[in-house]
Image (tube, rainbow, N blue to C red):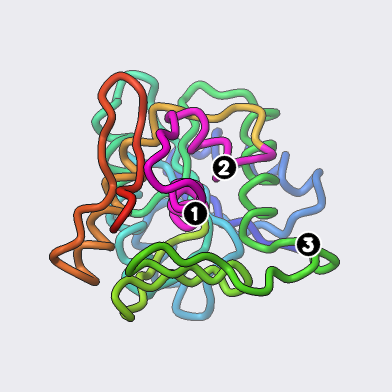
Amino acid sequence: MNTIGVVDDEKNIRETVCMALRREGYGVAEYSNGEEAWAAFGAGIPDLLVLDIMMPRMDGIELCRRVRALRSRVPIIFLSSRDDEIDRVLGLESGGDDYVCKPFGMRELLARIRAALRRAAPERDEPPTAAGLSVGRLTMDDERYVARLSGRAVPLTVTEFRMLRSLAESPGAVRTREQLMRSAFPDDCYPNDRAADSHIKRIRGKLSSADESFDGIETVYGLGYRLAIDP
């Protein structure tokens, strides 16, 4: 049974989400602010986190950054007010995988949680991929979800790995934002195409940290992105 961590200072929202998760059979750990959650994470981080962005005593963005600093790949879904686009962008750039806008439908949130958990833990009866992929200085191990650039490991989340993998499958070919999000969220009925730009920005930053000379992800304005043929 997966345990979902719900961090939100709005008691009504927190309790409603937790109740729905329990009905679906999930274990639930609930916290009223980021500071309380961070203190509890010392004993272990839940299998997935649902974080409100705006909270007192450590907001969701700071909590996400701290979790990612531990090199944790736990899926993180942000809850954001519909009008606060800058907060959603900051949340994704700090390491979030997805976001749901308030007010939200519980059906949508549950669908995103199920999809995120499937991405994080592939089915055990799936046959392992033998070789992965290699494009120039970039290699990708599909079995371990590990990418390397110029021999150095790149700490990608599952979402980031799948998006980069989609680009690397066809170097030089353009992938639209929708195609990239579908590759990362194949089971999601509610893909956030606008989140693609934030994910790509994070991927670029991590690749650059591994090799400063790398500039292989090109923006094709009006369409999407592509991986340079010789990255």
- For the residue labelled by badge 2, is the local secondary structure a helix, a strand or a loop? helix
Instruction: Give x and y (percent) for residue 66.
Output: 32, 66
Where's the N terminus, which quadrant?
bottom right
Camera-nearest residue between 144 and 188: 144
Q: Residues within 10 Å of mark 1 (few under 14, many from 20)?
A: many
Instruction: Give x and y (percent) for residue 205.
Output: 23, 57
Where's the C terminus, which quadrant?
bottom left
Instruction: Give x and y (percent) for residue 81.
Output: 38, 26
Residue most extreme to the left: 213
Q: Residue at x 49, y 45 (%)?
A: 77
Above-or-below relation of 189 to 113: above
Q: Residue at x 71, y 42 (%)?
A: 19
Magenta residues span: 159-187
Q: CA distance from mark 1 to mark 3?
A: 19 Å
Q: Earlier in the sequence, mark 3 or mark 2?
A: 3
- For the residue labelled by badge 3, is the local secondary structure a helix, a strand or a loop? loop
Residue assigned mark 2: 183
Residue assigned mark 1: 165
Instruction: Give x and y (percent) for residue 92.
Output: 35, 44
Q: Residue at x 66, y 28 (%)?
A: 189
Q: Residues within 10 Å of mark 2 (few under 14, many from 20)?
A: some
The three-letter code of the residue at mark 1 reads Arg
Does 111 appear in magenta? no
Question: Residue 98 vs residue 116: left or right?
Answer: left
Q: Residue at x 65, y 35 (%)?
A: 188
The three-letter code of the residue at mark 2 reads Ser
Q: Earlier in the sequence, mark 1 or mark 3?
A: 3
The three-letter code of the residue at mark 3 reads Glu
Residue assigned mark 3: 123
